[in-house]
């Protein structure tokens, strides 16, 4: 007698692995594109400068302020304990200004930037109440009220912190 060879039972396409694998590749690209679009629409465009020419001119003024700070030998040590900011300044000549402005600039989110005025204490330090700051990368810019000099530093906050500020020239 003649026996017919047995044929394997074929499974429906949705019960096999290869079609799902092939579908998953373009589907993941579509999901990633939708996620990117949502992030782009919800995030502000804080890093884009509208007037780049004025920003370029401002860089020259900043360099002049940093050079002035270097000539004065200005450096500062800023400490934050979660409640208060304390700034100790060193220079070739004693500082006579009663207040100093500290700009705290977030690395990527301009809406988190803050400006704080530190007041001179009888012991020569400058202090102010520390505002709530998110953990992350920040930039510090320290200037007197007449903006004649500037010293700066970078800082990563994740609790109490200490930053050494100096001119970048």
Image (cartoon, rainbow, N blue to C red):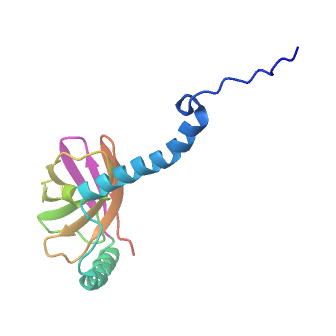
- Indicate whether residue 67 is drawn in magenta: no
Location of residue 111 in the rendering, given as x and y in whole percent from the top left corner = 19, 58
Location of residue 38 in the rendering, given as x and y in whole percent from the top left corner = 29, 52
62 up-or-down from 2: above or below:
below
Residue at point 51%, 43% (across, down): 23
86 up-or-down from 44: above or below:
above
- Indicate whether residue 81 is drawn in magenta: yes
Q: Nearer the viewer, residue 44 or 85?
A: 44
Location of residue 30 in the rendering, given as x and y in whole percent from the top left corner = 42, 50
Q: Is residue 52 left or right of residue 28?
A: left
Q: Is residue 123 left or right of residue 61?
A: left
Location of residue 135 in the rendering, given as x and y in whole percent from the top left corner = 30, 45
Question: Magenta residues, as a range?
Answer: 74-89
Q: Quadrant of residue 120?
A: bottom left
Residue at point 26%, 46% (across, down): 134
Q: Nearer the viewer, residue 3 or 122?
A: 3
Q: Can you say which quadrant of the picture contains the C terminus? A: bottom left
Q: Quadrant of residue 106?
A: bottom left
| Magenta span: chief secondary structure | strand
């Amino acid at each position: 007698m003649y026996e017919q060879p047995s044929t394997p039972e074929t499974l429906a396409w949705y019960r096999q692995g290869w079609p799902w694998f092939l579908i998953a590749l373009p589907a993941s690209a579509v999901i990633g594109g939708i996620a990117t679009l949502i992030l782009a629409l919800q995030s502000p465009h804080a890093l884009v400068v509208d007037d780049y020419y004025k920003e370029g001119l401002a860089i020259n003024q900043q360099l002049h302020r940093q050079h002035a700070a270097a000539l004065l030998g200005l450096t500062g040590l800023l400490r934050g304990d979660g409640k208060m900011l304390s700034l100790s300044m060193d220079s070739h000549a004693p500082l006579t200004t009663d207040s100093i402005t500290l700009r705290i600039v977030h690395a990527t989110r301009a809406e988190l930037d803050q400006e704080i005025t530190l007041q001179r204490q009888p012991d020569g330090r400058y202090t102010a109440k520390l505002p709530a700051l998110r953990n992350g990368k920040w930039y510090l810019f320290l200037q007197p009220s007449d903006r004649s000099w500037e010293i700066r530093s970078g800082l990563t906050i994740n609790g109490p912190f200490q930053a050494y500020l100096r001119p970048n020239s």
